Amino acid sequence: MELKTLKTNRVPVRYYEGGTGKPLVFLHGAGGFIPADTFLDKLSAKYHVYAPLLPGYGDSEECPTLRDMLDITLHTLDVVEALGLKDPVLVGHSMGGMIAAEMASIAHNDFTRLGLIASAGLWMDQHPIPDLFAMLPYEMPPYLFHDVEAGTKLMTAGVALDNPEWLKAFLVQNARQMGMAGKILFPIPERGLSERLYRIKAKTLIVWGASDKLIPPIYGEAFKKAIKGAQLTTIPKAGHMITLEQPDELVSALGYLA
């Protein structure tokens, strides 16, 4: 995957591109991309993948004029247009799934295939989603991974969670990223998406990790019920970070949208 820069109306956008075949746009979650994540490489073996970074992620510029869900949705639609893509497969993980679902509901004639991976965007009072913004790094892995020990090593590249240098770098990067993510996820990840899901016309696949403790699998059922004709696939031995724990199974499941 090659990291490139794209001009948009608001701010230059950094994005990863690679592979051949049908175009697929992948929208990342609140944690962004980490070096241990092989998902995009595996996905690019089957698709021509475009994976834009939200402003404030990685080495991309921040963009204060992106203020809310509508701004971020329209910005990402602008990115797809600037890439020159017509009807790409649209896939998003967690926060990225929330954005993808908004795009497919607002521009419902522009996307015919939609993949939502452990998507944020809905809220059930009886099944509250834990507050990532209030968590310290060592508190996150049990909510993110099926295999907490192995997942922690992936998250930290094998460095101990209490390593001062790793912790400093993580907190600085996390502050930038959560500044952007908080515009749609804080205090709770709910911006009225449930009232717009009926507009989605795309062939939709919903994928959930059976062991997801951040956004429980019951939310997958809620998305399936709200989107006409949607299919739901549950992947065993996977938590919220399916892209890290079960990338091969996830890529295989997304074949439904090919």
Image (tube, rainbow, N blue to C red):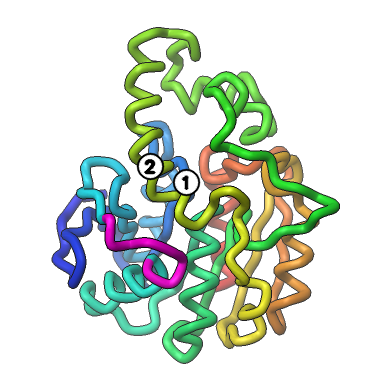
Asked whether 69 falls inside the magenta stretch, the response is yes
Residue that carries the numbered disc 2 in the rendered image: 177
**Residue 245 seen in render:** yes
Nearer to us in this view, 257 or 176 = 176
**Position in image of residue 56 (x %, y %):** 29, 46
Query: Could you classify mark 2 by the number of other residues whose Cα lies within 10 Å: few (under 14), some (14-19), or many (20 or more)?
Result: many
Q: CA distance from mark 1 to mark 2?
A: 7 Å
Nearer to us in this view, 98 or 62 = 62
Q: Is residue 104 left or right of residue 7?
A: right
Residue that carries the numbered disc 1 in the rendered image: 30
Q: Is residue 22 left or right of residue 205?
A: left
- Marks 1 and 2 close (CB-CB < 8 Å): yes
Q: Is residue 91 left or right of residue 236?
A: left
Give the residue displayed 54% in from the left and 52% down from the top: 185
Give the residue displayed 22% in from the left and 47% down from the top: 60
Three-letter residue code for mark 2: Gln
Marked residue nearer the N-terminal end (1 or 2): 1
Give the residue displayed 37% in from the left and 48% down from the top: 41
| Magenta span | 64-71
Dominant secondary structure of the residues highlighted in magenta in the image: loop
**Position in image of residue 198 (x %, y %):** 66, 84
Above or below: residue 116 compared with residue 14? below
Above or below: residue 80 compared with residue 200? above
Query: Could you classify mark 1 by the number of other residues whose Cα lies within 10 Å: few (under 14), some (14-19), or many (20 or more)?
Result: many
